Amino acid sequence: MTITHHRWWVADLGREMGINRYGSSGIPFLAFPAQEGDHRNLESFGLIESIAPFIEAGKVQVFTVDSYDAESWTSQTLSPWERGQRYEAYARYIMREVLPFIRTFSLELPWTMGVSMGAYHAANFLFRFPHDFAGTIALSGVYELSEFLGSYGDETVYLNSPLWFLPNLNDPYYLDELRRKKIIICVGQGAWEEPMLTHTRQLASILSQKGIPAQVEIWGPDVYHDWPWWKQQLSYFMERELGGS
C-alpha cells in the first residue's frame, strides 16, 4: 500500500497539522480519528488494514487528519463558547485547506468517515456542507454535544449539532442535496454504546421525517464500542458499497 505523509502549519489553529494519504487512486475518503486522536490513529488501531484490499485495488484512497478535539469540544479548560470558536477554526481548516489538498489528487467529491468522536465529525461535516461531500460512513457517533457541554447551547453549538439543526432544516437547497448523498450510520447495542445508540435512533427518525434516504443499521447486543467491531463494520460497508475488493 502506498502511504504518504504530509503536514503544514495552520495559522488559525496555532500548530502544525498532519495528514496521511493511503492509496494512490479511487474514491477519496476524508477520515477523522477517534476522540483526541491524530492522523495515525486509524492506522495504529488496524482500521486502515481492515480496508486494505480496497485501497490496494485502487478503489479508495483515504486521507486521515488530526483531531482538534482537546482544543475544542473536549477541552477541560476552555469555556463552552471558546470551544465552539476553536471548533469553527478547525472547520475552516478542513474546508479551506484539507479539501483543496484532497482535490489535488481527485476531482471526485470525498466521502467522510469516522468512528466514535470521528463519526460525529464525519456526519457533522456532511450535514453542514452537503455540496462538498459525496456521503458518509459514521460508526458509533454522538450527534449533539451535551456529553461535552452539558446544558450549554449557543448558535455555534446549534449549527454543529445535527440532532438540533436538522429538524429545523427546510431549505430545499440543502435538503435536495442531502437526499442525493450516501449516508451510512451504524451503532451497536453492546457495552459503551450509549448515548451513541440513542443518538443514532434519533438521527434515523429525523432523516426519515425529512425524506433523506439513509442506511441506518443497529447491530446486536454483543456489538460494543471498540475497534474490533468498527473494523468489521467498515469492511462490511466498503464491501457492500463498492462491490467487493
Image: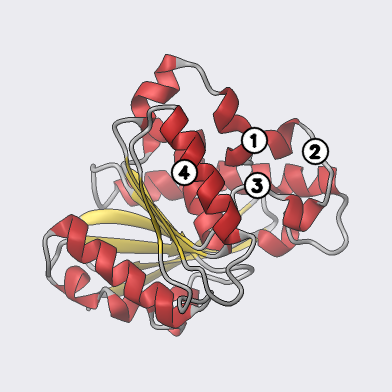
Amino acid type for the residue under numbered disc 3: Glu
Is disc 1 placed on a helix, strand or loop? Answer: helix
Q: Earlier in the sequence, mark 2 or mark 1?
A: 2
Amino acid type for the residue under numbered disc 1: Trp
Amino acid type for the residue under numbered disc 2: Gly
Q: CA distance from mark 2 to mark 1?
A: 10 Å
Residue 209 can be seen in this image: yes
Q: Which mark is residue 144?
A: 3
Q: Residue furthest front?
A: 221
- Is 137 drawn above or below residue 116 in the view shown? above
Is disc 2 placed on a helix, strand or loop? Answer: loop
Q: Indicate the position of residue 14 as horizontal and vertical percent values.
A: 70, 56
Residue at (58% x, 68% y) in the render: 193
Q: CA distance from mark 1 to mark 4?
A: 13 Å
The residue nearer to you, when weighing 31 against 1, is 31
Q: Earlier in the sequence, mark 2 or mark 3?
A: 3
Q: Are marks 3 and 1 in contact (CB under 8 Å)?
A: yes
Q: Which residue is mark 1?
A: 164
Q: Residues within 10 Å of mark 2 (few under 14, many from 20)?
A: some
Q: Earlier in the sequence, mark 1 or mark 4?
A: 1
Q: Which residue is mark 4?
A: 204
- Is 165 drawn above or below residue 135 in the view shown? above
Q: Are marks 2 and 1 in contact (CB under 8 Å)?
A: yes
